[in-house]
Structure formats: C-alpha cells, structure tokens
Image: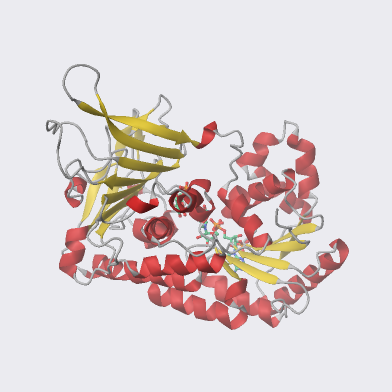
Amino acid sequence: MKKTKNQMLVIFGASGDLTARKLIPALYNLYKGQHLPEKFVVLGTSRSFMTDAEFREKVVSESDFLKSKLDKEDKDFIQQFTNQLFYQDLGDNYTDSYANLAKRIKELNEEHGTEENYIFYLSTPPSLYESIAKNLCDQELTKEDTGWKRIIVEKPFGYDLASAKELNDGLHHYFEEKQVYRIDHYLGKETVQNLLVTRFSNSIFEPLWNRNYIHHVEITNAETVGVEKRGGYYDKSGALRDMFQSHLLQIISLLVMEPPINSSAEEIRDEKVKALKSLRVMKDEKDILENTLRGQYVASQINGEKVKGYREEEGVDPDSTTETYAAVKFFVDNWRWKGVPFYVRTAKRMPTKVTEAVIHFKTPHHQVFPSQDTYRQDNKLIIRIQPDEGILIKFGVKVPGLGFHVEQANMDFYYSDLDSAQVMDAYERLLLDAMQGDSTLYARADEVEAAWNFVDPILKCWKESDAVTTFGYAAGTWGPKNSDELIAEKFGWRNPGDLLTDESGFCILS
Ligand SMILES: NC(=O)C1=CN([C@@H]2O[C@H](COP(=O)(O)OP(=O)(O)OC[C@H]3O[C@@H](n4cnc5c(N)ncnc54)[C@H](OP(=O)(O)O)[C@@H]3O)[C@@H](O)[C@H]2O)C=CC1
Ligand SMILES: O=C1O[C@H](COP(=O)(O)O)[C@@H](O)[C@H](O)[C@H]1O
C-alpha cells in the first residue's frame, strides 16, 4: 500500500456544484475508509464570503450523499471530518486576496503540520486556470524546495486544439508537467481501469486483439438525463467536446494501445499517446459528412411524463444547433487495427443509462453449420463500464435436439459478485492517486493535445459547413432515425432489443 503524506488540499471554486456534489463526498469516504493522512486539511476558496462554519454547513447541506447520512451512524464521522474543512474568500481584489490566501495556507500548515505539501484543485470556470496558477506562483506557492506542490485541473481542458495548447503552455510557465494532474473522471472508474487488466493480464484475449480476428468495435455512452442545470456550459460545448474528446477517447486509447512495458504512469501514457496519434484524422467535408452524425433531443413524453426539448432548456439558445447526440465512425492507422472500423456514439436523453464497449469478432471463415441469418453468429466481448459493471462473452452453442442449430450463449463476470466489491467512486480514487503522487490515471499534456487533434476538424466542419444537419430525436429514444445508417454493419448498433432493462429501467448486462 502506498503511503499518503501529510498534506493540504486547496480547492478553488469551493462554493460551487462540483465541490459539494463530488469532491467533499469523495473526501468524506476517503476519511471514513482511513485513507487520508494523519495530518490533513482542506481549504476551500472562491469569491463568496463565508466563515469556516458556514462553509462546513454549506457543503453538508448541498451534498445529497452527506445529507442522507446525517441520521445514521455516520453523523459523528461527518462532524469529525468537517472539522478538517476551512474556508478563505478571495473577494474581488486579486492581489490582496491571493496574499491573504497564501497567509492562511501558511498558518494552517503550521497549525496542522501539513509539511508544506499542497494540492491545488481548480474547480472554477476554466478561463481562470492560468491566472490562478500565476497567482500561486507569484505567492511562491509552487516551488518544491520544501514539500511538494501539485495542481489538479478539471475538465474541459481547452475548447479546441489551439486553446488546449495555450493552456498547457500557460500552466507550464508556473508548474512542471510532473506537477500537473488533468482530471478525467472516467479514468477513475474501476471498469475503465479494468480494460488494461483484461487486455494485458490474459493470454486468451491479447492474441485475438487485432485486425485478424476483430471485425469492428462499437462503443455506446448513453445518458437518460438532459443537460440539467448546465445548459449555459453545454450549449457552447456539445456532446463531441463534452464526452467524446475527453472520456470516450480515453476509453478508446485503452482499447487501442499497444502493451506497455510496465504499469508505470509514463509507460502507460506513452502508449496511450501513440494510440491517439494513430486515429485517422478526417480530412475533408465529405469524409466528415459520411462518418459523423449529430442530433439534438426534442420534446417528448417519457413514461407518461412530459420532457422538455433541448432548445427549451434553461441557458440554451432557442435556435441552438448544438448536438446532444454525436456518433463517429473512424479507423486506426497502425499495424494492429488496419481496416477495423470503430463506431462510437454518445448522447443525452436516451432510453437508459449505459456505457459499454463491444468487441465484435469475425465470423468463422468457413460456415460448417447451415446458415442462420436470423441469429447473430459473431462472437462478442462486451465490456460494461456502467451500470451493472462486468464483462460478457457471447459465443455460439448447439441448440439441444436434432440437427446443428446454433444460438448465442453468455459467459459472464459481474463486479458485484466479487467478495471485495467495494468499488471506490471515481473522484475518490483519483483524489487519492493525486495525494500519493500517482499520475497514471490523469491525462498528460500530449495526450490531451492528441485527442483534440482528432476532434478539431470535425468540430470545425460541424461549425462551418452548411451541409451538416443536426437531426432531431424524441427525448427517450435511441437517437436520430438515420443513426443506423452510420454503422454499416448487418445488425446495426447493439440496441434497443439487445439492451435489456429491469423494472426500474436499469440497463442489465446481457
Ligand atoms: N459540476 C459538474 O458536474 C462538473 C464540473 N466540471 C468542471 O468543474 C469546474 C467547476 O464546475 P461547477 O462546480 O459545476 O461550477 P459552478 O459554477 O457551480 O462553480 C464555480 C466555482 O468557481 C468560483 N469562481 C467563479 N469565479 C471565480 C473567480 N474569479 N475566482 C475564484 N473562484 C471563482 C465560484 O464561486 P464564486 O462565485 O463564489 O467565486 C464557484 O465556487 C468547471 O470547470 C466544470 O467544467 C467537470 C465535470 C463535471
Ligand atoms: O463529464 C461529464 O460526465 C457526465 C457523465 O458522467 P457519468 O460518470 O455519469 O457517466 C456528463 O453527464 C456530463 O455532461 C459531462 O460533462
């Protein structure tokens, strides 16, 4: 077990949604699980004025997770945990306020023995990231002569390739790359990490993991929710930036990469960068029109309840063409993947919440048994990232009785069946890694730039070309009617008949 040194976590944007909904609950779970160091404090900061006591009260009252625990045995734990939380406002006068912040950090460090080990977590609007880094540097809070200093940067990391490069350059003025932790919460998900283990610790999969045996790869990321309260942000972003450029390209890099020589952060990230660089960049409008599709949900009824269309959501332009559905087909130009199509889709307001990668293997070269067009004969490996996390292999078996009729059977593994199924929340895992100085599950500068390099031409064409349409789809359905045209495979996307849901609408692995 790695040691977590005494330290202070300074959260910028501490009065915001992410802090209350994700960061504080994750820190609480780390506290309860005894993963925090003996000497540890959290200092929240933002422009709003609050006392320490008000900050403690606010984060508990705004976290559904902590509120739900207040009546239970956790009550005392919550009290002890919140005693470690402090707050310092930044006001509007930056020069003075950063000097005050630095003073408070030094005082807390002395009082609590955090050994000048500081993590700065930037959970503010991204436009502030560089100026916060500069102010920290001006206050001499970035030097590592005594204690280490790390900076965690929330997504979105840039708006396009140029702005991501600019942000990387900006941060590198004040922090060395080894101090920068770019968060992508999908990398904190147990099942995403398990992609590496499935691929590289089993001799049964790796020999088949190439163009000789794989016919195509399909990835679905579907959410039932709409844009919720983030319409203002989302309308400038869209599904391709919000999900595909970050989370889905991370998953793709893990599926596509070559085996690393060992499991160190640099070796794994070197291979991920190579994988991202091998994605074939779409060059012209024709290519993009043929291989991408964008959609937007329109008003509908889900389970008898009226659901707003995207353009009626708060913060969204009523004439917006921003996509809430994005599908992309692409190829990977390297020895392993030559000619294997990848189909990826991501969307909001789908019938169920599910993220999964499906590896479709080629059918046998020679058909021994009678052709049965109505059955799927391809073997499939389904890696379910969420919910109902697990892995399923589909393979042909003989139907009992006369003749040789083949049907698909399942061989499965569910995380919930493990005795040690205490799966850490993604933010918990990632915060702990940063506290321990492990950046394996954080994106490196060149990785983020390689991801933008692939996405940039699509975004540009979607923005500038009159030939690009945003197709409507009724909220609660599987996307635009023509979405099956993109996936030029016999059985289309793995939906909706294949994706079973239980009574509560939970998408079960089958
Ligand atoms: N919420 C979520 O689910 C997710 C959020 N993110 C990212 O996390 C970041 C924070 O998001 P979220 O919490 O939702 O945003 P909010 O708008 O809820 O919070 C933003 C925070 O930044 C503070 N802030 C604004 N201006 C300044 C300033 N000039 N100086 C210091 N602090 C400032 C605000 O407080 P005040 O006004 O008091 O200064 C507030 O605490 C964003 O980059 C977002 O993209 C990423 C993934 C998911
Ligand atoms: O980063 C984001 O992720 C969420 C989806 O996360 P999940 O862990 O629930 O799958 C998405 O809703 C949001 O738009 C996006 O910014």
Q: Which of 330 and 84 is in front in this view?
A: 330
Q: Decide: is 84 above or below 260.
A: above
Q: Which of 279 and 80 is in front in this view?
A: 279
Residue sitting farthest toward the top = 401
Is residue 466 visible to the viewer in this orientation of the structure?
no
Residue sitting farthest toward the right = 111
- Image quadrant of ligand 1 equals bottom right
Colour pattern of the rendering: secondary structure
Q: Where is residue 89 in the image (x, y as percent from the top left)?
A: 71, 65
Task: Judge left or right: residue 147 versus residue 496.
Answer: right
User: Residue visible at 24% across and 22% down?
Assistant: 399
Q: Position of residue 211 (x, y in %)?
A: 26, 56
Q: Position of residue 292 (x, y in %)?
A: 23, 58
User: Residue visible at 61% across and 80% down?
Assistant: 174
Quadrant where the C terminus sits is top left
Q: Decide: is 285 above or below 480.
A: below
User: Residue visible at 75% across and 73% down?
Assistant: 102
User: Residue visible at 21% across and 28% down?
Assistant: 406
Q: In which quarter of the image is residue 373?
A: top left
Q: Nearer the viewer, residue 334 or 297?
A: 334
Task: Judge left or right: residue 305 versus residue 264.
Answer: left
Q: Quadrant of residue 4?
A: bottom right
Q: Where is residue 295 in the image (x, y as percent from the top left)?
A: 26, 51
Q: In which quarter of the image is residue 118?
A: bottom right
Task: Judge left or right: residue 477 versus residue 81.
Answer: left
Is residue 323 visible to the viewer in this orientation of the structure?
yes
> What is the number of callouts on the image?
0
Q: Decide: is 357 above or below 399.
A: below
